[in-house]
Image (tube, grey):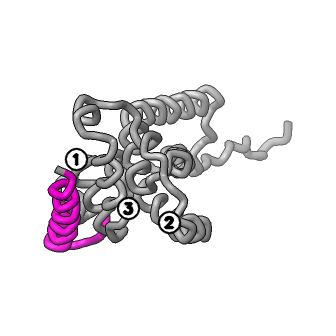
Amino acid sequence: MRVGAANPTPARSTERPARSFVEMVRTVAAEMSSYDTLDRAHRDRVTRLCRVLLADADEAADAVQDVFTKLHQSLAAETRPMDWAAWLTRVAVNACRDRRRSGWWRWWRERGIEIDESRLRTVRTPEDELVGRETQVRIWTAYRRLPARQREVFALRQIDGRSTAEVAALLGLGEGTVKRHLFRAVHTLRRVLGEAS
């Protein structure tokens, strides 16, 4: 050993040490647990919303798959606290809009292909049993003829149970505009119900 040679001390790194394999597995397990919890809590609601907005069970299933794929990706990337219920609703509405804008939607609408309303319902409720098939067809026909924005507002308020303020925030509208769209949609559907009775 030479005299005067300094014993080198390792330089301290300011970089964060790499996560261990165990930490990575725990992180992935936590993300999957969060995904599973959110999936169980919201999949039925999101499916119902997409079915109402698209009026087609198969297209709704594809939209729901897109929504939950985005949820999986966002859970891995998002670090701040989130209102996942509102986020899922917003992503679902946007997914349905994207599908309506696509070429197949125009092709399908122009040809007047009938929708099988029985596929729109997941479970028949006592109310469904009371309302006759003819009335249901008339209501769905009227609902499908509503402008897209009125359908979205109606679905979010009446089917998803969101408040006016929540619908306004989700769709980027003023509360007065939401109320106006809802009023028009309800007025149209009530008129159809009045004609049916």
* Residue 177 magenta-highlighted: yes
Q: Main secondary structure of the magenta part?
A: helix
**At x 19% / y 58%, what residue is drawn?**
195
Q: Which residue is mark 2?
A: 100
> Local crowd at mark 3 within 10 Å, few (<14), some, or many (≥20)?
some
Horizontal placement of 184 versus 110: left or right? left
Residue 40 position within the rendered picture, expressed as x and y whole percent measured from the top left: 42, 30
95 sits to left or right of 190: right
**On residue 144, which mark appears?**
3
Magenta segment range? 171-196
Q: Position of residue 141 (x, y in %)?
A: 36, 58
Measured in 3D between alpha carbons, the distance from the residue under mark 2 to the one under mark 1, in whole angstroms, is 23 Å
Which element carries disc 1, helix, strand or loop?
A: loop
Q: Is residue 116 visible?
A: yes
Compared with residue 112, is residue 25 higher up or lower down, i.e. above or below?
above
The residue closer to the viewer here, 119 or 148, is: 119
Give the alpha-carbon distance from disc 2 to disc 3, as whole Å. Answer: 12 Å
Mark 1 belongs to which amino acid? Gly
Mark 1 highlights which residue? 161
Q: Write the residue at 21% across / 53% down.
A: 196
Residue at 40%, 34% (x, y): give it.
122
Q: State yes or no: discs 2 and 1 in contact (Cβ < 8 Å).
A: no
The part of the image, by quadrant, that contains residue 170 is bottom left
